[in-house]
């Protein structure tokens, strides 16, 4: 157990958690929605600090981050817990974990960074679960990583509080944020959350200059409506930027938490979403295995070719500034 930050005392021994947009007011002996922040005798404790349930040198494209250090690997780790209860979750065994966490081995932040350096990874990604709910752990890792010249990334649902985002922003180089739908009813029904805080944080992240990419999972009958996707693509293009990459990914029912009875996403639904993104004016839309290459918006040449199913970048035709080798147009790539 580790003292939690992002909180303050409330009446009657309660503690107000200020870490995410749920803003749980937690009674003594109880935990917040995330199940990993517990009020013990009027003090809020992080139950998942130092509990790295997985570590791996993943291709950065797997996050997915296609325009951030393409062709490299990112040392990836996560800790148990999540502030969402997504019925479609693919990592539900760890995201929906409940405390019994103290029995798991502790991995100090220094060890995470040393592992990344030993593996030759130029970046560290906080992923697999929701970085917001292990923010104290993530921030300690990120401070050490930056001191050693590594870059950092979050793969997040985007439901962090302004306080959390303000603390992370100076240490954060890149983020992939799930924008699951534009419909608040979907967020409430499927995720146990709300959409507007996610939209607000996307605007904040984009304005901060952090490299940003957006992912939307197409769940048949839930988040694949063309009308909704048109609104979503218009939001990215109009309120963020046409250069922000949009990843449209397929739903696999066999590994989901509570949606195993649904069909998988059809290829034509992915193609339709790709077309919606392009019609909205987005420069970079990636959909399933059919649309994975980065095409220069100026000259139309393939600047990055990717082998379907491998995640890694196979061929890079970009210069040191991340621009197209053929015409030197910007590709909004961070090298």
Image (cartoon, helix red, strand yellow):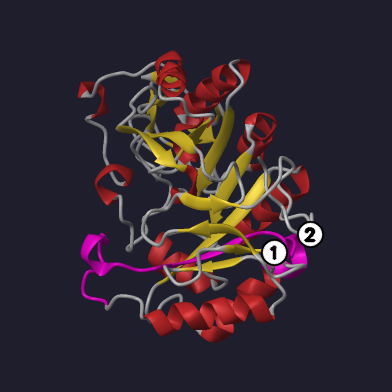
Most foreground residue, 82 or 214: 214
Tell me, yes or no, whether the highlighted magenta stretch contains residue 155.
no
The stretch drawn in magenta includes residue 248: yes
Question: Which region shows up in magenta?
Answer: 236-262
Indicate the secondary structure of the residue bearing disc 1. Answer: loop
Q: Quadrant of the N terminus?
A: top left
Q: What secondary structure is marked by label 2?
A: loop
The answer to which image quadrant residue 8 occupies is top right
The earlier-in-sequence mark between 2 and 1 is 1
Relative to 251, 242 lies left or right: right
Label number found at residue 296: 1
In percent of the image, x 61 and y 42: which residue is there?
Answer: 174
Q: Is residue 219 visible?
A: yes
**Residue 20 drawn above or below residue 28:** below
Towards the viewer: 184 or 280: 280
Q: Quadrant of the C terminus?
A: top right
- Alpha-carbon neighbours of circle 1 within 10 Å: few (<14), some, or many (≥20)? many
Give the alpha-carbon distance from disc 2 to disc 1, as whole Å.
9 Å
Name the spot of residue 88 as percent of width and height, x first.
Answer: 33, 63
Residue drawn at (45%, 14%) of the image = 110
Indicate which disc residue 83 carries: none
User: x, y (%) of residue 248?
Assistant: 49, 68
Residue 19 makes an appearance in the image: no
Q: From the top left corner, tell me how far across and down residue 332 is, in percent.
A: 72, 52
Q: In the rendered view, would you say 100 is above or below 155?
A: above
- Residue 53 x %, y %: 30, 32
Q: Are marks 2 and 1 in contact (CB under 8 Å)?
A: yes
Comparing labels 2 and 1, the label whose residue is closer to the camera: 2
Examine the rendered structure and indicate whether residue 152 appears above or below residue 88: above
- The answer to whether 113 appears left or right of 227 in the picture is left
| In-image side of 155 versus 241 (left or right) | left
Tell me the residue that label 2 is attached to: 327
């Amino acid at each position: 157990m580790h003292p939690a930050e992002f909180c303050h005392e409330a009446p009657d021994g309660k503690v107000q958690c200020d870490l995410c947009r749920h803003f749980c007011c937690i009674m003594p002996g109880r935990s917040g929605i995330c199940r990993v922040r517990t009020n013990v005798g009027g003090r809020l404790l992080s139950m998942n600090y130092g509990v790295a349930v997985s570590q791996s040198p993943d291709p950065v494209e797997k996050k997915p981050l296609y325009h951030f250090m393409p062709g490299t690997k990112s040392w990836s780790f996560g800790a148990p817990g999540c502030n969402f209860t997504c019925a479609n979750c693919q990592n539900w065994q760890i995201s929906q974990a409940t405390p019994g966490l103290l029995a798991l081995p502790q991995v100090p932040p220094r060890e995470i960074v040393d592992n990344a350096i030993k593996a030759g990874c130029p970046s560290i990604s906080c992923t697999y679960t929701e970085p917001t709910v292990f923010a104290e752990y993530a921030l300690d890792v990120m401070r050490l990583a930056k001191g050693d010249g590594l870059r950092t990334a979050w793969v997040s649902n985007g439901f962090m509080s302004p306080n959390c985002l303000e603390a992370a922003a100076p240490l954060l180089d890149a983020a992939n944020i799930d924008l699951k739908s534009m419909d608040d009813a979907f967020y409430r029904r499927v995720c146990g959350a709300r959409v507007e805080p996610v939209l607000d944080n996307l605007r904040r992240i984009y304005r901060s200059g952090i490299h940003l990419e957006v992912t939307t999972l197409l769940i048949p009958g839930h988040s694949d409506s063309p009308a909704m996707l048109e609104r979503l693509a218009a939001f990215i293009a109009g309120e963020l930027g046409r250069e922000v990459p949009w990843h449209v990914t397929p739903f696999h029912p066999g590994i989901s938490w509570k949606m195993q009875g649904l069909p998988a996403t059809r290829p034509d639904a992915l193609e339709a979403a790709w077309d919606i993104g392009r019609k909205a004016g987005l420069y970079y839309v990636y959909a399933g295995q059919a649309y994975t290459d980065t095409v220069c918006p100026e000259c139309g040449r393939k600047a990055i070719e990717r082998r379907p199913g491998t995640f890694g970048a196979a061929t890079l035709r970009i210069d040191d500034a991340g621009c197209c080798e053929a015409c030197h147009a910007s590709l909004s790539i961070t090298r």
